[in-house]
Amino acid sequence: MSIEIHRHFLELALKEAENALNEGTYPVGAVLVDENNEVMAVGRNQVYPQMDMTAHAEIDVIRSGGDAVIKSKDHNKKMTIYTSLEPCPMCTGAILFADITSVVWILNDDEGFGGFIKIRDTLIYDRKYKKLEMVEEPFEDLKEKQIELLKKWDEHPNNVRNVRKRLNSSSIG
């Protein structure tokens, strides 16, 4: 797949990450694309709006693309998921078991809950990983934009660190 196509879909994922932040949740967006570069689903992290800890961006697009994902799996069609942040362990599992053939993300998350690379390195799902193309951090400018969204999230009232600070300060007084 051409680098320009990667950029286009990663920009869509980044826009969804901005939408997630504006909705008061962790800024991650994702786009699911078929082998003809048709968008099957667009989604974002919706943990706080839906009050659902599994409402991650990658899970959102896999669920929304349900019929297309199932048919692609049954008919050996290729699907690519674009995401603004390295998938966590839960999302990695969903991607692997949905037999998505390519994963492209803007920013590695080795300091947080990023699990895609860590799980790959265990070799537990080596057979599935060998069928999968992985592209990490292909664009420095988009990486910087995702980093900025994460910095804004650090200041957001819904960030767990800020919730804990509020709770601790209210219990002291």
Image: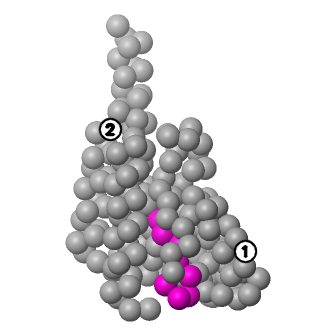
Residue nearest the viewer, comparing 119 with 106: 106
Task: Answer few, some or many: residues within 10 Å of disc 1's Cα (few below 14, many 20 plus, some between 14 and 19).
Answer: some
Q: At numbered mark 1, what does the secondary structure look like: helix, strand or loop? A: helix
Above or below residue 36? Residue 94 is above
Q: Which residue is mark 2?
A: 156
Residue type of the residue flagged with mark 1: Ile
Asked if the magenta segment contains residue 33, the reply would be: yes
Rendered location of residue 36, percent (x, y): 53, 88
Give the left or right position of residue 168, taking residue 59 as reference: left
Q: Depth check: 58 or 162 in front? A: 58
The location of residue 171, given as percent across then percent down, is 42, 12
The dot on residue 112 is none
Q: Amino acid at mark 2?
A: His
Quadrant where the C terminus is found in the figure: top left
Magenta range is 30-37
Q: What label sits on residue 70 in the rendered view?
A: 1
In this view, the residue farthest toward the top is 173
Q: Residue at x 31, y 43 (%)?
A: 154
